[in-house]
Image (cartoon, rainbow, N blue to C red):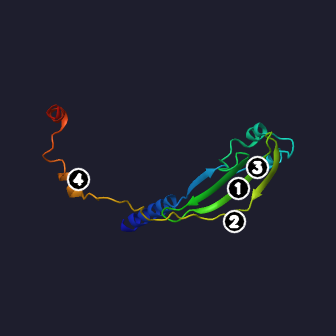
């Protein structure tokens, strides 16, 4: 009897462990299908053609609206571990003043860098109010309609 209970418990624990270890898959951005990219012809395709074929760009260049970027990343993550990158692509398209494609290129993902935000505070000048001062600061001050009427 105890042996059966132990066997059932072991099998259920094993199955629960297998199910709990399924990775979480995440897709961010737009991974460009290279077969679709071949439909875009340099010197012929327009912005409308690019949107029809690839969809809206992930990012339009900050300094030049004639440069479009398509970024995409697929990751999988097991529980609390760091995500593992499965696929990552970046694609750039440049247009001339008339909106015709003049250049398209796959960007090297090896050149990608992780940007870590700086954990600092901007200094502010003046009095910093403590929690106690905030809680007790309004004691004795009139509030609501009575306070507004008394000021008139």
Please identify, in this view, whether the residue under mark 3 or under mark 1 is nearer the observer.
3
Numbered circle sitting on residue 93? 3
Q: In this view, does 5 lie above or below 70?
A: below
Specify which label sits upstream in the sequence, 4 or 3: 3
Secondary structure of the residue carrying tag 1 is: strand
Q: Give the distance between the C-alpha atoms of the residues marked 1 and 2, in whole angstroms.
A: 11 Å
- Which of the pair 33/108 is nearer the observer? 108
Residue identifier under label 4: 134
Quadrant of residue 84 within the rendered picture: bottom right
> Which element type, helix, strand or loop, lies under badge 3?
strand
Q: Residue under circle 1?
A: 90
- Whether residue 118 sits left or right of residue 148 in the image: it is right
Give the distance between the C-alpha atoms of the residues marked 4 and 1, in whole angstroms: 50 Å
Q: For the N terminus, give its image quadrant.
A: bottom left
Where is residue 143? Give x, y as percent.
18, 38
According to the picture, the residue beneath numbered tag 2 turns out to be 111
Which is in the foreground here, disc 4 or disc 3? 4
Which residue is pictured at 86% across the width and 41% down the height?
44
Element at badge 2?
Answer: helix
- What residue is at 58 percent from the left and 55 percent from the top? 25
Crowdedness near tag 4: few (<14), some (14–19) or many (≥20) residues, C-alpha within 10 Å: few
Q: Alpha carbon of mark 3 to alpha carbon of mark 2: how far?
A: 18 Å
Label 1 neighbour load within 10 Å: few <14, some 14-19, many 20+: many
Label 3, label 1: how far apart the Cα atoms are: 10 Å
Residue for point 47% across, 59% down: 16
Separation (CA) of disc 2 from disc 4: 49 Å
Of the two numbered discs 2 and 4 in the rendering, the one whose residue sits closer to the viewer: 4
């Amino acid at each position: 009897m105890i042996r059966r209970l132990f066997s059932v418990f072991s099998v259920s624990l094993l199955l629960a462990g297998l199910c709990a270890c399924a990775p979480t898959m995440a897709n961010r951005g737009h991974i460009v299908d290279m077969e679709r990219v071949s439909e875009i012809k340099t010197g012929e395709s327009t912005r409308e053609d690019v949107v029809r074929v690839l969809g809206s760009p992930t990012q339009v260049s900050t300094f030049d609206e004639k440069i479009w970027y398509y970024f995409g990343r697929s990751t999988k993550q097991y529980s609390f571990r760091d995500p593992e990158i499965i696929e990552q692509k970046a694609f750039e398209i440049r247009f001339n003043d008339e909106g015709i494609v003049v250049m398209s290129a796959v960007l090297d993902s090896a050149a990608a860098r992780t940007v870590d935000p700086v954990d600092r505070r901007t200094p502010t000048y003046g009095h910093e109010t403590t929690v106690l001062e905030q809680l007790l600061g309004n004691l004795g001050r009139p509030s609501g309609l009575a306070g507004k009427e008394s000021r008139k």
